[in-house]
Image: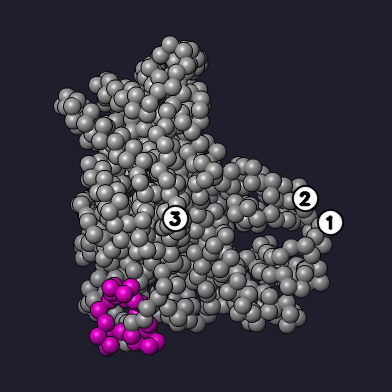
Amino acid sequence: MGSRIAAHFANAGIPSLLLDLTSEAARKGVEAALKQRPGGFFVESSAALITPGSFDDDLHEIAQCDWVLEAIVENLDAKRALLKKIEPLRRADAILSTNTSGIPLRQIADGFSPELRANFLGTHFFNPPRYLHLLELIPGPATDDALLEFVSGFAERRLGKGIVRCKDTPNFIGNRIGIFLLGTLAKLTVEQGFTVEEVDALTGPLIGLPKSATFRLLDIIGLDVASLVSDNLYRALPKDPWRERFPMPEFHRKMQEHGWLGEKSGQGYYKRIGKEKTIYALDLKTLEYHPAQKPKFPAVDAVRGTEDIGERLRTLIHGTDRAGTFLWKLLSDYFVYSAESVPEISDRIVEMDRAMRWGYAHKLGPFELWDAIGFEEVCAKLEAEGRRLPENTLRMRSAGAKSLYEPRCDGTKYFDFAAAQYRPFSEPGIILKREQRIKTNPGASLLDLGDGVLCVEFHSKVNALGEDHFRMIHAGLEETERNFNAMIIANQGEMFSAGANIGLVLFAAQNGDWDDINDMIHRFQQMNLAIKYSKKPVVAAPFSRALGGGCEVCLHAARMQASVETYMGLVEVGVGVIPAAGGCKEMLLRLGDSRKAGELIGQARVSSSAEEARQLGFLTAADRVTMNPDRLIGDAKELALELSLDYTPPPRAHVKVGGDAAFATLKLGVWTYRQGGYISDHDVVVLEKLAHVLSGGRLTGEQVVSEQYLLDLEREAFLSLCGNAKTQERIAHMLKVGKPLRN
């Protein structure tokens, strides 16, 4: 864990000293963070910011450190012993924190000097620190308030963390609620005779949880780690009426005895077998593995098309089938326990929801999910079963409240159980709201963000770009020129954009509507040119996936304000076409080399972070990166306003192309890859079309051409490839299974 935290500090540009039992162990920790997939570092070069060392030889070096962060084994005696060694060596004003998932801070700090206790706090990073947004901050018995404020602000801004302030209670918030949920799932699995595959099918995206669901999550966490945390809760909460939910079940214990600890040991609830890495699942009764089965739940299949999670779950929990009964028992206990845990582990429901969203990657926290299904509806169903509601919810209903959160024009408010009234709370960063919309269609909207900044927000499924988006961007550019100082292109969906709507392209191609495809590509191209040469600055704010056409939109913006977790690439060759909305043109301009552009586009390279996107050429030196995703929209707005002060549109670009010599070089590379068996015959067709465009249409010698000239070549190549049956097969396959077809 220490090496992963050090890697994340390095991601933020902060050097660190990493100490372990030996220097070699520390070095291996850094190497593991480098090899880890997904990786612990944004770019490999950041590993140079970590200096490995050992406790015996280098502990004195902490005298130079501003922050001493202990992240050793989860053992009270071990932590206190190390703290005694650290105390005389650390600088008097240095921050001292322990990374613990549940040991009470008062026990760790007991007996140490008042000066140390004032600078001591708990910092619970969720693993892996790079990807999980949550950082729980836990004050010790004498932590200085100013120190807590400083660490909170620093971790939010520089480390990009979502901060949740916790009380010094067993396992704090995230693991207290998370382990209760896992324990409840284990209990229901045994009682209702469900399989590993069935539980994971019901407890993943269907209910707003990650694809790792339940047993896959335990494999990732490690069965031993899960037992350690759950056992700690069982011991620490002798008076908790739900205490028996915490221990892991008998089958989990037997797996540990066999050494089946999950991914770290190569097998757990799942394992991969053979050269094909076929997934096998564990039979919980016999502890034998069998090929993983795809569960069948007719009630679940009936609601798969329902986008709204609340509507989906309302339908399921009122059913009497196995799936509905299982989900109702799970969610009802989850809601009741969460409500009963206020104010013991948190005074506000807000922190509990954030802990589960940011630490466990749930789409909604327990109280948000309760509201989504319907607060009164859940209460009525509990009462109909003769179950007593938590005192907090009884008090809430007595006050006439109908929901746990109440949206208002001046911001959402939460229900304060103690005060029995709604109270305001601040959201981290800017939240895009419907009330800000001044124009909308099914795919996109224009929002007034205030201060003279207009936002084009995408809000279609995976933000696949089509006519709705083109029209709204054009409308946004016109509105900005008339009434605003700058425009940003941003959204707060699951991703910036998965690319152009290839389903529409396939439909038109299969019907021979070539003029429609030509017109659509032409409009996309002209829209991107309009973004690039707008009289007022346009800032794109990509995050998560910005692929294909989504990447091309960003490439034409005056600047990008990218989330650090941005996976950007021109991936069109994967569906048998080439970038045709200016992607080839822009990469030629940025890289100045048809060979480099050909490799980047031909290999469908996707960055593993915004910093790698900069190395690949998608981001320029002038583009900016935001560490904290909550701040992305605000940072993009700030950058747009900064540019608007003295903005001048760029001059019309001209592009240098290599002509027939460049085409020959690119074609030789394609031939070499084919001879080596790395690509298929159809890949050759696609890549030769790409080479034709990047070389400038095989002109004689090096020449300088206009942007429109290259856009015309892009469009012609795209159209010809759409007419190829193998390209149509690739598009259809991608739409069906979400993966490229190598035909």
Q: Residue at x 27, y 82 (%)?
A: 401
Q: Amino acid at mark 2?
A: Ser
Q: Earlier in the sequence, mark 2 or mark 1?
A: 2
- Where, quadrant-wise, is the C terminus in this rendering? top left
Work out whether residue 278 can be spotted: yes
Residue found 72% across the figure and 70% down from its top? 94
- CB atoms at circles 2 and 1 under 8 Å apart? yes
Q: Secondary structure at mark 1?
A: helix
**What is the x, y in percent for residue 718?**
30, 25
Residue under label 2? 23
Q: Which mark is residue 57?
A: 1
Of tags 3 and 1, which is closer to the observer?
Answer: 3
Q: Is residue 85 left or right of residue 510?
A: right
Q: Position of residue 143 (x, y in %)?
A: 64, 79
Q: Bounds of the magenta span?
A: 396-421
Between the C-alphas of marks 2 and 1, the distance is 9 Å
Q: Looking at the image, is mark 3 or mark 2 earlier in the sequence?
A: 2
Q: Residue at label 3?
A: 645
